[in-house]
Amino acid sequence: MTASKKSIPPSVVRENAKDIAAPGGAWTFLSNHTHVLLCLYRAPDSTTREVAALVGITERMVQKIVAELVESGFMDVFKVGRKNTYKIHVKKTLRHPLESHRRIGDLLEHLKK
């Protein structure tokens, strides 16, 4: 399977980064792990800097989350030239017992729209 050449345009990164500090508190319905997965699902060739700006976390935290997702079998990282590209294992089931009957790809497909 060939990797997509999509990446997140800088204007989208800047615009979304402004929205993170929205009023209503600091919590969100989805975890940073889900946000990172969603960014990499939408644009597998994104940089950690782009993902960090979209999610509203540091590049180091993105790297830590990616390492955890790789270790848990939710994704693989491939080196393509000087960049990484990410492959999400969409058939892997969600971890929590309440959602374990659903695949990560189902969630990501609904959220990517």
Image (spheres, helix red, strand yellow):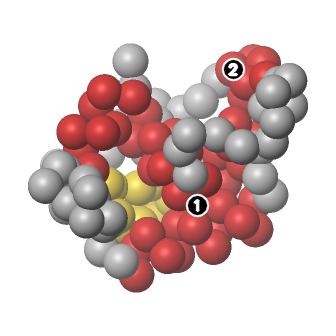
- To which quarter of the image does residue 3 belong? top left
Label ID, residue 82: 1
Quick one: 71 or 47, which is closer to the camera? 71
Q: Nearer the viewer, mark 1 or mark 2?
A: 2
Q: Is residue 77 above or below residue 13?
A: below
Give the x, y percent position of residue 106: 22, 39
Disc 2: CA contacts within 10 A as few (<14), some (14-19) or many (>=20): few
Q: Is residue 38 above or below residue 10?
A: below
User: What residue type is disc 1 on?
Assistant: Arg
Q: Is residue 18 visible?
A: no
Residue appearing at x 28%, y 31% in the figure: 109
Measured in 3D between alpha carbons, the distance from the residue under mark 1 to the one under mark 2, in whole angstroms, is 23 Å
Give the x, y percent position of residue 83: 56, 57
Residue appearing at x 32%, y 55% in the figure: 87
Residue appearing at x 25%, y 54% in the figure: 99
Disc 1, SS = loop
Give the x, y percent position of residue 92: 19, 61
Left or right, residue 14 beside residue 8: right
- To which quarter of the image does residue 108 belong? top left
Left or right, residue 98 beside residue 34: left
Residue appearing at x 66%, y 54% in the figure: 48
User: What residue type is disc 2 on?
Assistant: Val
Give the x, y percent position of residue 56: 77, 44
- Residue highlighted by disc 2: 12
Left or right, residue 12 beside residue 44: right
Quick one: 21 or 69, which is closer to the camera? 21
Q: Is residue 35 visible?
A: yes
